[in-house]
Image: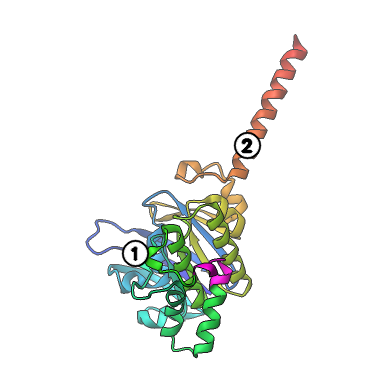
Amino acid sequence: MIALAGVGYRYAGAAGPALLDIDLELRDGEVVGLAGASEAGKTTLCLVVSGLAPRTVGGQIRGQVTLDGEDVDAWPMHRLSQRIGIGFQNPSTQLSGVTDTVFEEVAFGPMNLALPRVEVVARSWAALDLLRIDALAERDPRRLSGGQQQLVAMAGLLAMRPAHLVLDEPTAQLDPAGTRMVGEAIERLAADGASILIAEQKTDLLASICSRLLVLDGGRVALSGPSAEVLADLELSRLGVAEPSEVRLRRAADAAGANVARLAGAFARD
């Protein structure tokens, strides 16, 4: 489990904090969603949970971050990265750039864990199969579309089999079919015990895979609770988050029903 208690974070040189008083528990086998308007603090929280902030990006952090019950304040990044995987919306930040085939790219991470060759091969094929991109195995990753590269980057992350996974808008470059594949992969990983934090603009995806949801506003948690409740909250649109299609349709149907009832009442009075 990853737990944050009273966490605040300020980027180096920034006039004010990017995060304020964040409390979060990410339990094993759970998918927690993260939503909010642009600049609300979603990416920053992903960086903090993964350990990249402040270790890699600098800045100052306060509060406590624990991983499986251990305070990680003094942990170096290489130790954290063995337990927590992070995926970003731009695949160019994750592809190694040194491999000639998609299979080699996916295998790159497990190879650096010094795993046996048989294990590396098995994990790589399993990750490719999970995202249904095994047909790309012999392709040059540098010659793929942005969406295909994103799926390859995701496969490389899945092949590492981290116990905890942080994803910052992993479907930003994907079409509905690709988004569905990533959602299914996330659900399978959670079923195997992984804890997953996913920041997304696509609230339909969050509604389908997340048990809980946090909505950030100005670096603070504005809404928190079961996904269905948060995504139906009337405050959501004010916070710059689009309602999922199911909620929009339900409200449209309710409004239409109310209009019909009013018309029927008017006719009855006439």
* Residue topped by disc 1: 9
The answer to which quarter of the image holds residue 100 is bottom left
Q: Is residue 68 left or right of residue 17?
A: right
The span shown in magenta is: 128-136
Can residue 8 be seen at all in this image of the molecule?
A: no
Amino acid type for the residue under numbered disc 1: Tyr
- Marks 2/1: CA–CA distance: 38 Å
Q: Secondary structure at mark 1?
A: strand
Q: Amino acid at mark 2?
A: Arg
* Residue 242 x %, y %: 50, 44
With respect to residue 139, does 216 lie above or below? above
Q: Residue 261, how many percent across, how many down?
A: 72, 24
Circle 1 residues within 10 Å: few <14, some 14–19, many ≥20 = many
Q: In which image quadrant can residue 182 be found?
A: bottom right
The residue sitting at the front extreme is 138
Residue bearing mark 2: 251
Protein image colouring = rainbow
